């Protein structure tokens, strides 16, 4: 029950993709409580949950979005045979920042002024 449904009629009418209720209803039931826990304790999921509630005001809609994120993350972890790392995003941002600083340090003073 977490698959995406596109609304499209021909080439001119295109709506926003939405999460439909078709699909495995048991999977939707099983992911309900983990999504509430993730929305409370996982920083990335909490940010998503709070952002969607402030935008739409619908807690169930935000909960379903967190369920879908958990399902996607689970699929990726199983597919790549990786372990869950809650600091993954922070490490990625830190590595990007270090790489940017290295590029700036490698530039000559004349290029840095541009």
Image (cartoon, rainbow, N blue to C red):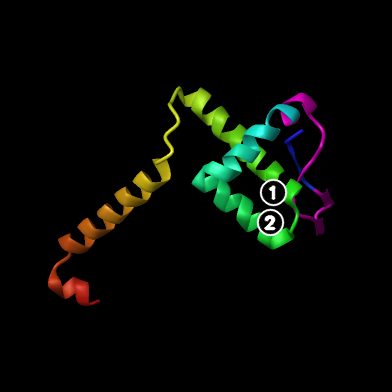
| Pointer 2 with pointer 1, Cβ within 8 A | yes
Mark 2 element type = helix
- State the extent of the magenta-drawn residues as a range: 7-28
Q: Residue 17 colored magenta? A: yes
**Residue 1: which quarter of the image?**
top right
Task: Tell me the element at label 1.
Answer: helix
- Local packing at callout 1 (Cα closer than 10 Å; few below 14, some 14-19, many 20+) is many
**Percent from the top left, x then y, of residue 29?**
75, 29
User: Does residue 79 appear to the left or right of 97 in the view shown?
Assistant: right
Residue placed at 57% from the left, 28% from the top? 75
Q: Is residue 110 magenta?
A: no
Residue 17, x across and y down, in percent: 74, 49
Q: Which mark is residue 49?
A: none
Residue 15 appears at what percent x and percent y?
79, 55
Q: What's the residue at 67%, 61% (across, down)?
A: 54
Within-10-Å neighbours for mark 2: few <14, some 14–19, many 20+: some
**Residue depicted at x 50% and y 28%:** 77
Q: Quarter holding the C terminus?
A: bottom left
- In the orientation shown, which residue stands out farthest toward the bottom? 113
The foreground one among 81 and 35 is: 35
Residue occupying the far left of the picture:
109
Relative side of 39 to 9, left or right: left
Residue 62 is marked as: 1
71 left or right, relative to 8: left
**Which residue is denoted by mark 2 in the rendering?**
53
């Amino acid at each position: 029950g977490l698959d995406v449904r596109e609304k499209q009629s021909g080439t001119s009418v295109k709506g926003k993709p939405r999460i439909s209720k078709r699909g495995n209803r048991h999977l939707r039931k099983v992911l309900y409580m983990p999504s509430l826990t993730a929305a409370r304790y996982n920083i990335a999921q909490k940010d998503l949950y709070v952002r969607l509630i402030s935008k739409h005001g619908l807690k169930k809609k935000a909960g379903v979005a967190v369920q879908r994120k958990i399902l996607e993350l689970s699929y990726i972890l199983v597919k790549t045979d990786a372990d869950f790392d809650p600091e993954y995003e922070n490490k990625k941002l830190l590595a990007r920042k270090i790489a940017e600083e290295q590029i700036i340090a490698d530039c000559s003073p004349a290029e840095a002024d541009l």
